[in-house]
Amino acid sequence: MINLTHMTMAEAIKGLKNKDFTSVEITRAHIEAMEAAKHLNAYITETPELALKQAQESDKRRAGGNAGELEGIPLGIKDLFCTRNVQTTAGSHILEGFTPKYESTVTQKLWDAGAVMLGKLNLDEFAMGSANTTSYYGNVINPWRRDGEPNTDLVPGGSSGGSASATAAHLCMAATGTDTGGSIRQPASFCGITGIKPTYGRCSRWGIVAFSSSLDQAGAFARNVEDAAILLKSMCGHDPKDSTSAKKDVPDFAAALADQDIKGLKVGIPKEYRMDGMPEEIEKLWDQGVEWMKDAGAEIVDVSLPHTKYALPTYYIIAPAECSSNLARYDGVRYGLRVEGEDLNDTYSNTRAAGFGDEVKRRIMIGTYALSSGYYDAYYIKAQKVRHLISEDFMKAYEKCDVLLTPTAPSAAFAIGENEDDPIKMYLNDIFTVPASLAGLPGMSVPAGLDANGLPLGLQILGRPWDEETVLRVSQSIEKAANFTAKPALLQEKQAA
Amino acid sequence: MSSLDKKDVAKVASLARIKMSDEELEKYGPQLSNIIQFVEQLAEVDTDNVEPLASVVDLNLSLRTDEVTDGNIQEDILANAPETLEGFFVVPKVVE
């Protein structure tokens, strides 16, 4: 008997086509898995009834010969995508109970392709965080455990922690995420799965709760490269409702994987990413990645991205500045929480004090400060200029190479509560992912090995703008060489039981 | 190096319309100062003759036809409002 939650999405698509099982059967199996893993807190809102209804409709469509590309596939949706008539919280108290009357473009595309929604996945509040410990709806727990520490809960990474945890724990077949400074790639690395952020402009941002509009980009989580490619294709495409979405044809990403030969491809190794104090096992994994690339016939090229060290400070001006502007809309008037005050201003201030958590308040205040009169040029314009230099660094590097290979994150998953004493320590989690975000580049994290505690570590592949296909092909090559078959503790326990 | 004292934090919190207790103002002061000091590293980068980068995608914003594409959705627009009356959002009295 096939285990309906353990197949890949590609296998499920094939099995559905062959009528080996129905969408209702797969969907039900996932709903049962969700029931059994509630302690991970991966979902904020589960929608089992809607899922079964969608699955029945999907099975009918298939019987009628009208199967879409994701027909009958049960997915989890990050709770930052607005979904019609299903609560959308962005992980914030201020949006508790908010039930959109419209559907985000990306999720609409998924339903048009026949997919089924299992529920809305937990995340850091307004996608601000690197550990999924800032959600109003509680911490998400990583299904992985350190060897010999069965009682220590680890973070799944963030901000798309629910998406990563649920995909790794087989609580959905794949999931959507968003990435502003690393929010897909870093949690994918922490949870031992794949995650791809496409080029800025590939996916419409319409209907995604905005954090930092010049950086936010949707992307895909899956348990292997092929599944991520399949899901990503259905998410991408031009949307007149988002003026920054690109008028470009969407390649058949999965088809690009048929060409497994990366011989002669130039893989750049940015020397600035070899940071002081980098854990030895991260360095070892990176070196291993280089060896795998050589074995596959790729040419290794040393490149320099001289402004790398300025990426985080640049990011921590631009993202908070845009967030302070975007989050000004939460005023207690049109939707969300309202806490009455003496007058309108007092109502605003009370509402926002009660509705936002600490990290969101911190970022709104940094952004407000950076944009305030007298500081605008010194902070915001300065950061935009450095952003230009960071982007140029990449373009110069791509004159010498086709992709870049780096670690995804400077560590494996850490315990809940660690790195919380100092916001900047938490920000350092994204040191390898933020620069490419500032440059709008496509990037993917692939599980490549385990650390000394038995936790997954990812390698990151960055590509030229609009060249997700090469990113995916190189990722597949690493996936093949790494042969990563380890499973999270949660699943091992289940299989043993 | 800038650092934010309690008065600065109070000003920023007021601009951001976030009510803060004295305790919170004390708490955020050092945290925000640390972050501001961290980002001030940028001052050492030579950005003479560098254009600010506002958007990474090389897109020409296109104009669409100036026509109504939706409408008659008053109920939808008001559906999530904390308080409505006769088809309007209700806010506390603004004009005395």
Image (cartoon, coloured by chain):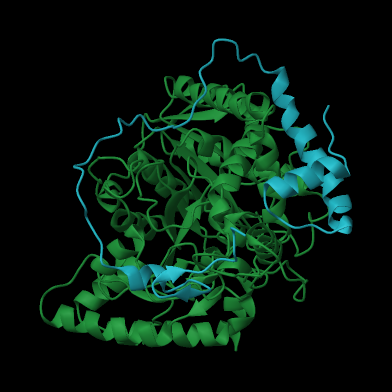
Chain colours: A green, B cyan
Whole-percent x, y for residue A80 in the image:
49, 62
Residue at position x 54%, y 69% from top? A336
Instruction: Give the quadrant of residue A36.
Output: bottom right
Residue at the far top in the pictured view = B49
Front-most of A44 and A222?
Answer: A44
Residue at position x 77%, y 43% from top? B11
Whole-percent x, y for residue A112 in the image:
24, 67
Front-most of A334 and A445?
Answer: A334
Q: Is residue A226 above or below residue A103?
A: above
Residue at position x 58%, y 47% from top? A323
Front-most of A430 and A14?
Answer: A430
Q: Is residue B51 above or below residue A350?
A: above
Q: Is residue A92 visible?
A: no
On-image quarter of the C terminus of chain A: bottom right
User: How many numbered marks appear?
Assistant: 0
Horizontally, residue A305 falls left or right of residue A28, namely right
Q: Is residue A493 visible?
A: yes
Horizontally, residue B52 falls left or right of residue A470, namely right
Whole-percent x, y for residue A168 in the image:
53, 68
Instruction: Give the quadrant of residue A117.
Output: bottom left
Horizontally, residue A233 falls left or right of residue B37, namely left
Instruction: Give the quadrant of residue A133.
Output: bottom right
Residue at the far left in the pictured view = A65
Q: Is residue B22 above or below residue A144?
A: above
